[in-house]
Image: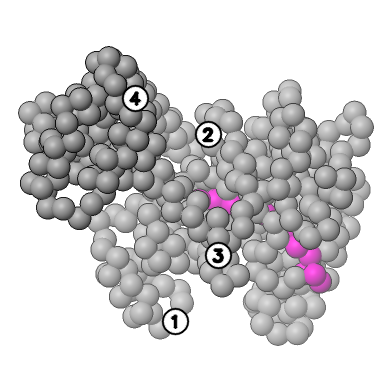
Amino acid sequence: MNDIRPLFENRAGSKARIAVCLSGTGSNAKVLLQKFRQPDCSFEIAVLFTDQPETSAAVKLAQEYDVACESLDICKYYAANGEDSVKLDTPHRRELRKSWSGEVWEKLKPYNCDFVVFAGFVPLNDLPDMIPCLNVHPGDLTVEKDGKRLYAGLHYLPVENAILNGEKSLRSSVILVPGYSKSQVVDGGPVLGISAPMEIDFDGAALEELKACKSGRTAPPYHDKLRDIAGKNVEKLKYSGDHVVLPQAVEYFASGRYGVNEKDELFCKDDSGIWNCIETVEFFPDGQAPEMHQKKSPASKLKQNGFKRLCKYLYIKMVRGTGSPDYIARGWALGMFVGCVVPVFCQLIVSVPLSFVFRCSKIGAVLGTFITTPPTAIFIYPVLIWVGNKVINGNLSADSAGKLLEIFNSDLPFIDKWQAFADTGGSLVAAFFAGGLLWAVIMTPLTYFGVRFLVVRYRKMREALRKRSARE
């Protein structure tokens, strides 16, 4: 790991000095200022900068948190140079962007900053050519297709594209912005962090309706259902995404935990100081430990994505179910019990009716049986039969479980499977049920209390975010 070059190394015994750039309400800047006030923070905010001094919250925040504030109005700068728009669609406007960025840099130089954070900073600029710059983005920049980031782009575009692509959740990303001279790709650069997924609020709209909005557009500005829903989700993502990932990724960067090798692969130091090759780091609210997403080969990535999506699907279904925590937990516990005791091929016809009897979550009763699917049964059933054989003091051979697996995975009709199961002999059937019951006695209460804890915790977190959003 000697070829790894840290993206940032702080001066010994001092905190990293940063400039925070903002254009609007400053909610992202505020969470950084709040983080900066904490005694164990690895950075200090030397200056706030805004391109909109008359309308942004920069001056107010600077006074509230006692930090310096600088500004250079980009609209007035362009107007003074004969342009009525800050777009980059002509050579002259691109040249103005370069000169404006240069003047901004001159304003920041005296503060001796180590890096810059774009916290809701609108204008594209050339600062990344002069100093390391981090940016928070309303989209998951780890999602790619044909080597291109699907959810790159400005303003509402990442969220609209995620909605139209059928995504069920959104994330915010923090990237190290590449210099314009090195890369002209929008939202390029290593993805230092992503937030935990936030479920998309479709506000009752159907996907086809939103796709029709997109196809019916002519010229901006757009005032349609798709833009309204995207706007609402962007605002929600600010609180559950930006405000979670930005301060934590900046903290990681300021403490020197990111690095790259000669292949420009991203690395991150774990708590023991060991470098890990990663795709990104996922950050969570409420003090939950960040999770490194290890870099994988394309083949293994495809496999892992399927398993990861399944796990996330199960988690979302678990914590976001309707009904009381007890109602949801009872359903999952019932599903777990059935999954342990009942053979794979008839679990659903047992768990669903029982969910009505016990008045518990139907979804939990179904998904809880996933403890034993055909792939997992290969590992679980041999253990159950071995344990059950000990319980009944039987003398089954080591390959007895193979007989059951052949039956369960066969194409036999339902009735024939039951007959074949019975024909394996009383000892094998008894060992199967004895081992399953013992496993169920352990797993059912663990599932109940575990699911109940997760549901209660999730709802408290959502309520806290809602209250914080209302206050701000």
Specify the label residue 386 is tagged with.
4
Given this view, does label 4 or label 1 mark the residue nearer the observer? 4
Q: Image height check: is 117 above or below 349?
A: below
Mark 2 → mark 1, Cα distance in angstroms = 39 Å
> What is the three-letter code of the residue carrying label 4?
Trp
Crowding at dot 4, Cα within 10 Å, few <14 / some 14-19 / many 20+, comes out as many
* Front one among 450 and 139: 450
Which is more foreground, mark 4 or mark 2?
A: 4
Between disc 4 and disc 2, whose residue precedes? 2
The residue that disc 1 covers is 219
Residue 152 is one of the magenta-drawn residues? no
Which residue in the structure is indicated by mark 2? 285
- The reply to whether dot 4 and dot 3 touch (C-beta < 8 Å) is no
Q: What kind of element bears circle 2?
A: loop
Tell me, yes or no, if residue 377 can be seen here. Answer: no
Task: Please name the residue that numbered disc 3 is placed on.
Answer: 144
Kindly state the secondary structure of the residue where label 1 is placed.
loop
The one nearer the camera, 431 or 270, is: 431
- State the residue in front, 170 or 471: 170
Lower sequence index among marks 2 and 1? 1
